Image: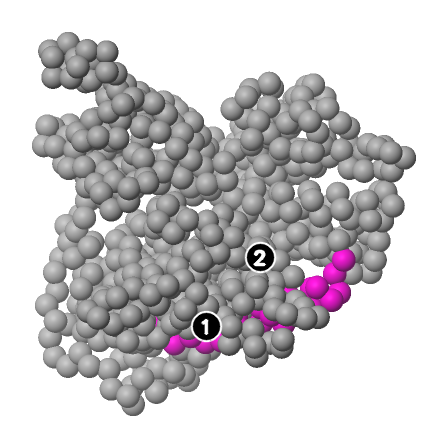
């Protein structure tokens, strides 16, 4: 069967593979319903300042697994919900940024620069319309690149990379993440080292599980969900509570601005905005495809590039100056940060390497549920019959396309409804997230030990934040430690025990040289 | 004293990381792993269990040395407030989890004493029945939300505890009512 047949089967898997739900007498495929619910959840979460998509994905994953189970039929409904959250949160982050000058997610920070001045001028709804239109446009463009790019990259990797090259590629990815996220690079390296070391405890191939000190509770290693949720979510909760305690004296009051005048966004204006949306979407897509960079930088670069271009063309135009409340500023930012979400799945699906926190949870879900083990083999055409993993991958693409269509159709209405979410007191919100995450972990492992590990890794995440050690390289290194060790063992054996197996081919040498170049380049850049 | 001898933030973090990496390499790894870096099994060389942690610690050491030698001169600052916060977080989480674990059995014991429950029943047979299954979770969850929120804004009040109870109730109900198979903490351990 060819690629076309697999695409068709993926589409059918979404429609018929996981059952139907009857709503008002109409049968709706379960994955489509979960995408819709995830999208609404994502917009709600994104609208609450302090919460972000990965946090909601973390809480939702154990619940989804409890509802749908671990079987292949659970794959698309669970992943559909998580993809919905990922996309919804990016759009939702613009709501408080525009209405209250408070970015719902870090990548919506630049949206405040023009979005909030528009609100003060009575153009809040127009700003929301611009944010929605730009965000969904950027996301759609990014998804198209994903649909084409991921299979192409995977086929290239599978054709040209053997075991030593794959090990070198994982090392290069870790160096890249350490260099990009670590400020300075040394901190990124420390985080990677910590993640790799934590993953070695209680694992290995010997009869005795290594580094456990005879402690029975460590003999299975640290549960992956506790490590990821602890450092990413609970660590953030502790850090937010600690910061709140310090900032209580300086809390301000929210000011309401009435909506006045024409707030529509006519087609002609949408066409004009496309001149800003398309370059920003390209920037966001390029950045999203690289592991570890993230949507905040994409938003900053998208905004800055659009501002420079606009000022070069209209040097004396004070009325449409960026930062004074122009729709173009909102469009450039939102298109760039939303374009990251599709492209960051390229390294996930083609290489099994997560590029950002949201991708970490998608990998965690794929790891927990049967159906797809992300690696270059996902897009390998079999000599006969079908590749079920490729079918699932095209099912995922279908879900992403459905999420975009739903976002186009109804995302704006949900965004407008969410204006009041900003009033939820954070001091109650964050402890609630902590309790919710504890329950989520418990229902998955049914052990208080898992909750204790969660709190412990939460403290580790808090300490790392205090020391300004980046969390993402730690988490990604923890996830990649197992495939790295396995690939190195197999690569070493396959080359007949060659100690220089990581330099055994020109591609290997290039990838290993890339590690050194990336680290030195970014270290110099940070120093300068 | 010259600037090169001041304890900066980066030097302190780098030193701690280096000390940990060296101590683990010298003491932990050799005593807690059965195989070496490279092993010969059935006349074939293969990677032993020690290589991965040794590699991770080498990266840690490299990062630690690099950080300690960096040119950032930001002062170390006080560590008293963060240390106190860590102790408070651990204390609140620990107390809440203990409450969660022992409130259910404690209330059942009291109910047995006053004759509401047949003597000798214990918590285990009741752990999946209302209202017993919620007792531990609600006690621990309410205190967790109440104490952490009060830590953040310094407002300790009974009303806040009530809100914490309501939030815990909503979370417990959201997990327990729609899903028969899900077990709230700590009932799976009892």
Q: Is residue A113 left or right of residue A227?
A: left
The residue drawn where x is 31% and y is 84% is: A270
Residue at the spot of label 1? A12
- Which residue reaches farthest right? B43
Residue at the spot of label 2? A374
First of labels 1, 2 by sequence position = 1
Who is closer to the viewer here, A395 or A213?
A: A395
Part of the protein shown in magenta? A134-162
Secondary structure under the numbered disc 2 in the rendered image: loop
Instruction: Tell me the quadrant of the picture where the C terminus of chain B can be found.
Output: top left
Q: Chain of mark 2?
A: A
- Which residue reaches farthest bottom? A268
Q: Chain of mark 1?
A: A
Residue B24 on image: x %, y %? 65, 24
Q: Can I make out residue B60 in this image?
A: no
Secondary structure under the numbered disc 1 in the rendered image: helix
């Amino acid at each position: 069967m060819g690629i076309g047949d697999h695409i068709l089967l993926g589409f059918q898997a979404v429609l018929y593979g996981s059952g139907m739900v009857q709503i008002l007498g109409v049968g709706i495929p379960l994955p489509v319903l979960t995408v819709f619910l995830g999208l609404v959840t994502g917009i709600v979460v994104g609208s609450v300042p302090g919460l972000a998509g990965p946090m909601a994905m973390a809480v939702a994953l154990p619940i989804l697994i409890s509802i749908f189970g671990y079987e292949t039929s659970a794959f698309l409904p669970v992943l559909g919900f998580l993809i919905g959250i990922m996309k919804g949160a990016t759009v939702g982050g613009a709501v408080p940024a525009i209405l209250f000058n408070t970015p719902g997610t870090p990548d919506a920070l630049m949206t405040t620069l023009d979005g909030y001045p528009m609100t003060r001028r009575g153009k809040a709804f127009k700003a929301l319309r611009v944010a929605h239109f730009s965000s969904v446009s950027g996301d759609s463009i990014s998804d198209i690149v994903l649909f084409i790019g991921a299979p192409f990259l995977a086929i290239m990797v599978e054709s040209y990379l053997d075991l030593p090259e794959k090990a070198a590629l994982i090392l290069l990815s870790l160096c890249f993440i350490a260099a990009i996220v670590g400020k300075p690079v040394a901190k990124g390296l420390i985080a990677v080292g910590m993640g790799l070391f934590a993953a070695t405890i209680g694992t290995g191939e010997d009869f005795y599980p290594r580094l456990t000190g005879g402690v029975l509770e460590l003999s299975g290693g640290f549960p992956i969900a506790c490590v990821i949720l602890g450092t990413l979510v609970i660590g953030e909760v502790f850090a937010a509570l600690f910061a709140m305690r310090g900032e209580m004296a300086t809390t301000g009051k929210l000011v309401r601005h009435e909506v006045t005048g024409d707030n529509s966004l006519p087609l002609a204006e949408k066409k004009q905005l496309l001149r800003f949306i398309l370059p920003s979407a390209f920037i966001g897509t390029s950045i999203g495809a690289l592991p570890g960079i993230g949507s905040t930088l994409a938003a900053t670069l998208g905004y800055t590039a659009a501002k420079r271009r606009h000022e070069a063309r209209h040097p004396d135009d004070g009325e449409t100056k960026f930062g004074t409340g122009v729709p173009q500023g909102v469009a450039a930012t939102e298109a760039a940060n939303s374009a990251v979400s599709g492209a960051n799945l390229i390294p996930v699906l083609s290489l099994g390497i997560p590029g950002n926190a949201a991708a970490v949870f998608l990998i965690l879900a794929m790891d927990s549920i049967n159906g797809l083990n992300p690696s270059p083999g996902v897009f390998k055409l079999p000599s006969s019959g079908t590749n079920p993993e490729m079918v699932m991958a095209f099912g995922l693409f279908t879900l992403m396309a459905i999420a975009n269509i739903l976002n186009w159709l109804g995302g704006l209405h949900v965004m407008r409804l969410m204006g009041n979410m900003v009033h939820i007191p954070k001091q109650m919100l964050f402890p609630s997230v902590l309790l919710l995450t504890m329950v989520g972990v418990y229902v998955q492992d049914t052990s208080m030990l898992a909750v204790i590990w969660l709190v412990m890794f939460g403290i580790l995440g808090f300490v790392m934040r205090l020391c300004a050690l980046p969390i993402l390289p730690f988490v990604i290194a923890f996830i990649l430690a197992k495939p790295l060790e396995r690939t190195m063992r197999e690569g070493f054996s396959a080359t007949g025990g060659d100690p220089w197996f990581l330099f055994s081919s020109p591609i290997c040498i290039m990838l290993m040289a890339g590690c050194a170049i990336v680290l030195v380049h970014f270290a110099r850049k940070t120093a300068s | 004293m010259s600037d090169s001898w001041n304890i900066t933030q980066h030097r302190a973090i780098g030193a701690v990381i280096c000390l940990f990496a060296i101590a683990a390499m010298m003491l932990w790894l050799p005593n807690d792993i059965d195989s070496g870096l490279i092993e010969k099994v059935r006349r074939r060389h293969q990677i032993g269990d020690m290589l991965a942690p040794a590699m991770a610690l080498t990266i840690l050491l490299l990062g630690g040395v690099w950080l300690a030698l960096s040119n950032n001169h930001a002062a170390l600052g006080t560590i008293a407030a963060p240390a106190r916060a860590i102790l408070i977080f651990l204390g609140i989480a620990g107390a809440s989890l203990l409450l969660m674990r022992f409130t259910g059995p404690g209330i059942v014991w009291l109910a047995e004493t006053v004759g509401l429950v047949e003597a000798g029943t214990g918590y285990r047979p009741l752990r999946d029945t209302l209202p017993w299954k919620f007792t531990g979770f609600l006690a621990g969850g309410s205190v967790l939300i109440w104490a952490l929120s009060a830590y953040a804004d310094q407002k300790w009040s009974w009303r806040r505890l009530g809100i914490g109870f309501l939030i815990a109730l909503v979370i417990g109900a959201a997990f327990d009512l729609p899903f028969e198979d899900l077990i709230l903490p700590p009932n799976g351990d009892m």
